[in-house]
Image: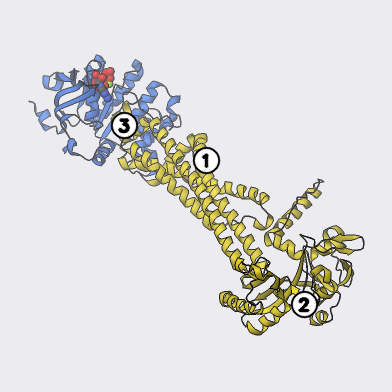
Chain colours: A yellow, B blue
Amino acid sequence: MNLWNTIATGFREILAHKFRSLLTMLGIILGVSSLVAMSATVKGMENGLKEALEEAGGLRAIRIEYEDDLPLRQRHLADQATGITMHDVYALQQSAPLARRITPLIEMWGFRRGALARFGGRRTRPYKFAGTWPDVLTIEQHELAYGRMFNAFDDEEARSVCVIGTDVRDDLFGSPEKLGREEIPIGKTITVNSQPLTIIGMFRHYESESFKKRKEALAKENEALIAAGKEPRNPRMRDEFIFRLKNSSIYIPLNTMLLKFRTAVHARAGADAQLTTLKMEIDDAKQLEPALQQARNVLMFTHKGIEDFAFRTREDDAGEITTSISDARRSGGIIAAISLIVGGIGIMNIMLASISERVREIGLRKAVGATTADVFVQILVESTVIAILGGLLGLLTSFGLIQLIENLTPESNAPMLTATPMIIAFACSVTIGVLAGLFPAIKASRLHPIQALRYS
Amino acid sequence: MSDSQESQRTILELRDITKVYQLGGEEIRALDGVSMKISEGEFMSIIGPSGSGKSTLMHILGCLDSPTSGTLNLDGQAIQNATPRQLANIRNRKIGFVFQFFNLLPKLNVLQNVELPMIYSGISARERQERCMNALKMVQLADRRKHRPAELSGGQQQRVAIARALVNNPRIIFADEPTGNLDSHTGELILDLFHNLHAEGRTLVLVTHDPTIAAITPRRIEIRDGKIATNVDRRLAGIEK
Ligand SMILES: Nc1ncnc2c1ncn2[C@@H]1O[C@H](COP(=O)(O)OP(=O)(O)OP(=O)(O)O)[C@@H](O)[C@H]1O
Ligand SMILES: [Mg+2]
């Protein structure tokens, strides 16, 4: 018997019991779609996290923070801890050749007390208000869309200038969505904690790829809704934190911060200016370890051995990301594997029921000349066809499932469909179909023609 | 011994066939030491009361069932030594079987049912079609080829089963009660068909209850309690030919 006839027979059998076959496929459909959807979700998560990591300066950025929690053995030295100062900056510039763009920052975070910015009757609390050097542009991967960054002269003379993110502009001057045009507030003077600052530059608007895509999709959808005379949808959409943070920040020269915002930064009179953070960069992520060692040696010297500072690198975050992603992938994989196995058992169950229902048919086929192999292949093909159809339907379902997940996850983590999990899931479903068919096929092929024909 | 029988080649030879069924510790001897020879081109009937073992004998002759003991030789081949694959091949090509209860597949239409043996002998779709139509014309059911078995009368179903038995051009045809549930007109039609097949030179073995049908076949065997009670060959007795 040739294979086409066998496959045609298998299809006929499945079509004869459409509903039953569909129920049988359900396990496979669920297994395949959950496997594919899970992979897409994890992939989206990974992309979102990687993008955020990149946006925060990538693996080459190092942050040094003031750490008021001294190690236990140094607690008694707390009154001598100086914190991070300009002295450290100069020392690092001199003695840590692997570190580049060493940049001091005095940061005020909007989460606690923060700065209050006003223009006209409007006010906003930016996430971040920081005094720093122009190099911060490179280290934090900012890009100016309009105007210029403050320079060394602005810093030297402690000029009252600032560079802002687009969210600050939106809050103080109005957003392009509301105004219908883009407001460029260069040259306008705002106040921050009552100190006047003139805007000399504005960053570009930062957003993740997936957030952008979602926004465009929504705009299109709303256009269609408006064209149909319906209310446009306005769902709350928030991008990944790092993008929001970068948009909602105000930067001023370091000296301006030190002179105009003395109380706010608790600068101690006469003492070396105390910083909140120190940032730097290395040329090559591979040099991270030696560069950290160098910087550490320098700081241990300037701090007289008191460890009131801590290093933060993106490597820690990257490691965490990798483990959490593989965890998610593993647990998702287990769930999908279980439903595939359940699906396989379902197929086996139905095939067993189907052959005991068809004992007469099998007996007759053997009586007119079907060999053991013919019957074996016929049953195996049936279960394989069910599994393949289930796999295909599962792939279709996974598209819907991914659509659903897309509406539930944060935009920056939008699921991403890739070919590999689809191929793997499909291959698994076919394998399971074959395995599930083996036992019933063996059982059917061993039926004795006469026993089968007498059976009723 | 007449010359005519001497010249006929033996196609089936049974020697001391027994078939024992075990039912809850009790032995049922469905066949008890049956020996006989069937020559090529013979037309014979097997009669006997219900439960005497006719169907059991037919199934063993048709290589569908294996005896508990004894040997069966079909066309020079020792069946008790054949592999399952060889048996399937013999059933497929040499034997046509018309079952007591038709055994048509309800999900297939008439054409597909008749086609079934040829599917397992690897015949091309076009030739299958042609031979199916010929077989269906022989049983006068060509116009019903698209019907399902459930849409046919008992007699029509029986004729489909006969067409299926003929379609692969077998040398031997076994029919278990082919006229059992039919009116006399359809019964005659089927008997005419058997006469034609006999005239073509095929070997035919019928099982029947009906003495009038048994009377028309040249050779008649009667089975009682799994044993051959009488073996009448009218050609030997000089009644015919
Ligand atoms: N699978 C089986 N298990 C046990 N006993 C069986 C089995 N098949 C047949 N028998 C017994 O063997 C005997 C012969 O059965 P068989 O079917 O050959 O009778 P038959 O002559 O064809 O009868 P009928 O004319 O009613 O068709 C019966 O007593 C029957 O009960
Ligand atoms: Mg019988």
Quadrant housing residue A140: bottom right
Label 1 to label 2: alpha-carbon separation: 73 Å
Most foreground residue, A271 or A281 = A271
The residue lying at 25 percent from left, 39 percent from top is B84
* Residue at the bottom extreme of this rendering: A94
Which residue position holds label 3?
A: B165
Is residue B75 visible to us here? no
Name the mark nearer the viewer: 2 or 3. Answer: 2
Which residue position holds label 1?
A: A26
In the rendered image, the quadrant that contains the C terminus of chain B is top left
* Residue at the front extreme of this rendering: A76
- Figure quarter occupied by ligand 1: top left
Q: Are marks 1 and 2 on the same chain?
A: yes
Q: Are marks 1 and 3 on the same chain?
A: no
Counting from the top left corner in percent of width and height, residue A125 is at 82, 61
Mark 2 residue type:
Ala
Q: Is residue B235 above or below residue A368?
A: above
SS class, disc 2: loop
- Labelled pair 1, 2 in contact (Cβ < 8 Å): no
Label 1 to label 3: alpha-carbon separation: 41 Å
Q: Is mark 2 within 8 Å of ligand 1?
A: no
Name the mark nearer the viewer: 1 or 3. Answer: 1
The numbered dot on residue A271 is 2
Task: Name the subunit of mark 2.
Answer: A
SS class, disc 1: helix
Counting from the top left corner in percent of width and height, residue A419 is at 54, 57
